[in-house]
Image (cartoon, rainbow, N blue to C red):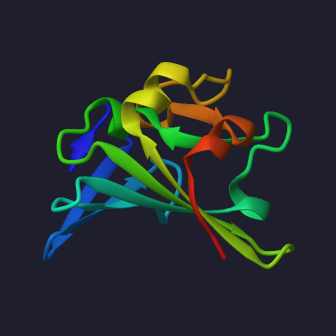
Amino acid sequence: MVSDGNGNEIRIGTLNNEKRIELKLKGEDRRRKIGVINTQSQTMVCTRTKEKHLHILADAYGFNHYVLSTATTFKDIILIEKRVTEGRILTYRIKVADILDFGFYMEFKNEGFEKQIFIKREWMKKYITNII
């Protein structure tokens, strides 16, 4: 467990070759799943439901900045985007370095572990690996 000094925590649980990363915010009772790291493939799998997680005005998904900027056991993000109303699932494989280089920040929750870096869906298209 790592704390950001604001009462927020990043928690990591390990099972076999996978590490589940969760964010526990000070003002919330529940933990938020950030992703699951597979140390063998050096990837972190993140699942997003478009209707729930997409920032509509920016047409972008957010990622925990601290987790990406301190990553040592994974180099790529496998993003599974569920599009419930369309009945489709898209999978992307994106380099962490590309998210950090080409992502952008928004003016809310910009401190500690709540800070997110966003990437636009239009930019993500070149990273599509599978459509179901």
* Front residue of this view, candidates 53 and 119: 119
Q: Position of residue 85 (x, y in %)?
A: 86, 74
Q: Residue at x 32, y 33 (%)?
A: 4
**In which quadrant of the rendered view does residue 105 lie?**
top right
For the C terminus, give its image quadrant.
bottom right
Camera-side residue of 21 and 73 = 73
Q: Residue at x 41, y 36 (%)?
A: 113
Relative image position of residue 57 (x, y in whole percent): 86, 36
Residue 6: in sight, yes or no? no
Residue at image position (15%, 70%) is 17
Q: Is residue 119 left or right of residue 96?
A: right
118 is higher (above) or lower (below) than 126: above
- Image quadrant in which you'd find residue 82: bottom right
Count the numbered circles shown: 0
Residue appearing at x 26%, y 32% in the figure:
70
Query: In the rendered view, does 68 fall on the left or right side of 59?
Result: left
Residue 91 spot, x, y in % from top left: 56, 62
Q: Is residue 85 left or right of residue 99?
A: right
Q: Residue 8, relative to residue 19: is it above or below? A: above
User: 26 and 31: which one is in front?
Assistant: 31
Say if residue 13 shows up in the picture. yes
Q: Position of residue 110 (x, y in %)?
A: 55, 24
